[in-house]
Image: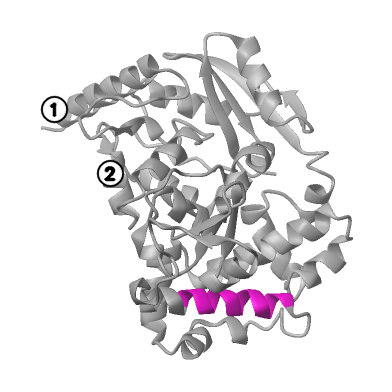
């Protein structure tokens, strides 16, 4: 079970679809790959449509405008999504590939056929080279065709498990050719074993401890696989309440000594004694969040980056707001240093544990990094 399991189900499970990210960021490069319809208005639009953004619960996605119109939706008059000449040919190819992947995985006779989902085979169906398809897919969807297939398999698996199917039936229906392939992917994509997921996360074991630090009290929680949460506050009760709110069905126990090594490294880091933290984490994330968090860990100690710079670094220059949201939902602050990301004008943006703590973190790291440089001279 990952650190965001219950939180993800309630807040960010819907955000795992890269199409929603494209709508949120009004990504014009996604135009032609799909259209989205809004239930409350009866209108469908391009991803880049400048109209007011709908609530995620009101949105449906369609491969092509004709599919939306067959369901009774009308074309938006602002973005004119039905006009063929505005469609990106590569986006159309990506849309066809996505539809083919879903068709293959929906067919019990071919769902486990990896050859049908290889890049060369998909590119041949799209009528472009494998290199072109790979680049176009990453540009439009933010992930690779293989990651798209894995994500679709996992969505089908979750759906079957929620309906009460046993694990064996669910895994084959979802397109996993064997149980070993499923369990290889489950820790990263499910955050726990399929059987645990089927029970709603019951039986998950989290150990935590609270220690004093230069920034107040720090709570460190972990599963057997790694650190799941790092919270900062002045009040132990607040920290414990926050942890139980995010994991209402988990078995949570305080462990004063079992996490001592990790806690010591974190506290020493906050004191400037250990600039680089390379600790294992156990957190569930969307493909986009994972890319952002990996980039944050590359920001050198004592320096900062802007949200725009991070967006460009992950190859999504228009995804500035989405980068900010990924920073805000980071469950393992300090280890994943979201405090090192600032606004374009240098001002500090929101920080879950308070702007003053973010300011202190940046100032302390800058000071310790400067001192270290002087000491090396």
- Please report the residue visible at 67 percent of the width from the left and 38 percent of the height from the top: 10
Image quadrant occupied by the C terminus:
top left
Magenta segment: does it hold 96?
Answer: yes
Magenta segment: does it hold 58?
Answer: no
The mark tally for this picture is 2
Residue behind mark 2: 308
147 to 125, vertically: above or below? above
Mark 1 vs mark 2, foreground winner is 2
- Corner quadrant of residue 359: top left
- 345 or 212, nearer to the observer: 345
Name the spot of residue 367 as percent of width and height, x first.
22, 22
Q: Which residues are magenta?
A: 94-106
- Where residue 374 is drawn, which disc sits there? 1
Name the spot of residue 124 as percent of width and height, x first.
48, 91
Q: Which element carries disc 1, helix, strand or loop?
A: helix
- Corner quadrant of residue 354: top left
Disc with the residue nearer the chain's start (1 vs 2): 2
- 211 or 60, nearer to the observer: 60
Name the spot of residue 164 as percent of width and height, x first.
89, 55
Q: Which element carries disc 2, helix, strand or loop?
A: helix
Name the spot of residue 338 as percent of width and height, x first.
40, 34
Labels 1 & 2 near each other (Cβ < 8 A) = no
166 to 237, vertically: above or below? below
Decide if residue 355 is on the left or right side of residue 149.
Answer: left
């Amino acid at each position: 079970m990952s650190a965001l399991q219950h939180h993800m189900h309630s807040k960010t499970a819907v955000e795992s679809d890269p199409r929603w990210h494209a709508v949120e960021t009004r990504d014009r490069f996604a135009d032609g790959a799909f259209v989205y319809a809004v239930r409350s208005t009866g209108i469908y639009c391009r991803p880049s449509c400048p109209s007011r953004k709908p609530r995620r619960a009101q949105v449906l996605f369609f491969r092509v405008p004709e599919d939306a119109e067959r369901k009774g939706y009308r074309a938006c008059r602002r973005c004119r999504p039905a006009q063929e000449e505005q469609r990106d040919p590569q986006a159309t190819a990506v849309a066809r590939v996505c539809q083919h992947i879903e068709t293959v995985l929906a067919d019990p006779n071919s769902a486990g056929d990896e050859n049908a989902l290889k890049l060369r085979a998909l590119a041949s169906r799209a009528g472009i080279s494998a290199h072109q398809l790979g680049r176009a897919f990453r540009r439009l969807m933010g992930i690779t065709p293989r990651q798209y297939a894995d994500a679709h398999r996992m969505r089908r698996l979750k759906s079957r498990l929620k309906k009460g199917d046993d694990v064996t039936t669910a895994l084959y229906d979802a397109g996993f050719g064997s149980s070993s392939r499923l369990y290889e992917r489950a820790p990263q994509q499910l955050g726990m074993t399929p059987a645990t997921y089927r029970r709603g996360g019951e039986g998950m074991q989290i150990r935590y401890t609270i220690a004093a630090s230069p920034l107040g009290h720090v709570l460190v929680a972990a599963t057997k696989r790694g650190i799941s949460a790092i919270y900062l506050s002045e009040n132990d009760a607040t920290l414990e309440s926050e942890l139980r709110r995010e994991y209402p069905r988990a078995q949570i126990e305080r462990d004063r000594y079992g996490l001592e090594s990790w806690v010591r490294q974190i506290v020493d880091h906050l004191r400037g004694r250990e600039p680089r933290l390379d600790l294992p984490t156990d957190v569930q994330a969307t493909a986009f969040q994972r890319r952002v968090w990996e980039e944050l860990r590359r920001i050198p100690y004592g320096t900062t980056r802007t949200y725009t710079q991070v967006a460009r670094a992950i190859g999504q220059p228009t995804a500035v707001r989405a980068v900010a949201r990924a920073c805000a939902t980071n469950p393992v602050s300090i280890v994943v240093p979201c405090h090192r990301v600032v606004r374009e004008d240098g001002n500090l943006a929101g920080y879950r544990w308070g702007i003053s703590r973010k300011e202190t973190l940046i100032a302390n790291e800058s000071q310790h990094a400067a001192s270290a440089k002087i000491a090396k001279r």
